Image (cartoon, rainbow, N blue to C red):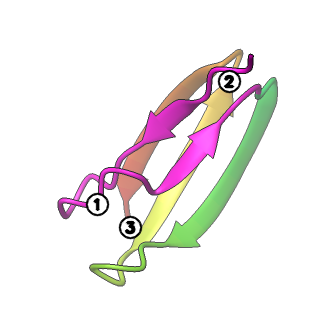
Amino acid sequence: MIIAKKIKCPNCNNKRLLDLVVAKDGELMIKCPKCRRIIDVTFQDNRIKVRAM
């Protein structure tokens, strides 16, 4: 069984912006479907940093 980390939106009450299973390195920008703000998500050694732009 694979356990994924749930990533929350820092602006609104969207508790499931995306799921992270494994991430070594990376960065992506996504738009929250509820509040429509652009969210910058940074992955580094299975750690997550989320901030609104």
| Amino acid type indicated by mark 3 | Met
Which disc, if any, is residue 34? none
Ranked by sequence position, the earlier of labels 3 and 2 is 2
Secondary structure of the residue carrying numbered label 3:
loop
Residue 45 position within the rendered picture, expressed as x and y whole percent measured from the top left: 71, 15
| Left or right for 12, reference 8 | left
User: How far is the residue under mark 1 from the one under mark 3?
Assistant: 16 Å
Q: How far across and down, in percent of the image, does residue 34 sit?
A: 31, 79
Query: In the depicted view, which residue is nearer to us: 22 or 53?
Result: 22
The magenta segment is 1-22
Q: Amino acid at mark 2?
A: Gln
Q: Which dot marks residue 53?
A: 3
**Going 64% across and 36% down the picture, which residue do you hit?**
20
Q: Which residue is mark 1?
A: 14
The residue at the point 66 percent across, 18 percent down is 46
Mark 1 vs 2, N-terminal side: 1
Question: Where 51 sits versus 4, above or below?
Answer: below
Closer mark to the observer between disc 1 and disc 3: 1
Residue under numbered circle 2: 44
The correct choice, above or below, for 17 with respect to 34 in the image is above
Q: Is residue 34 magenta?
A: no
Q: Is residue 12 magenta?
A: yes
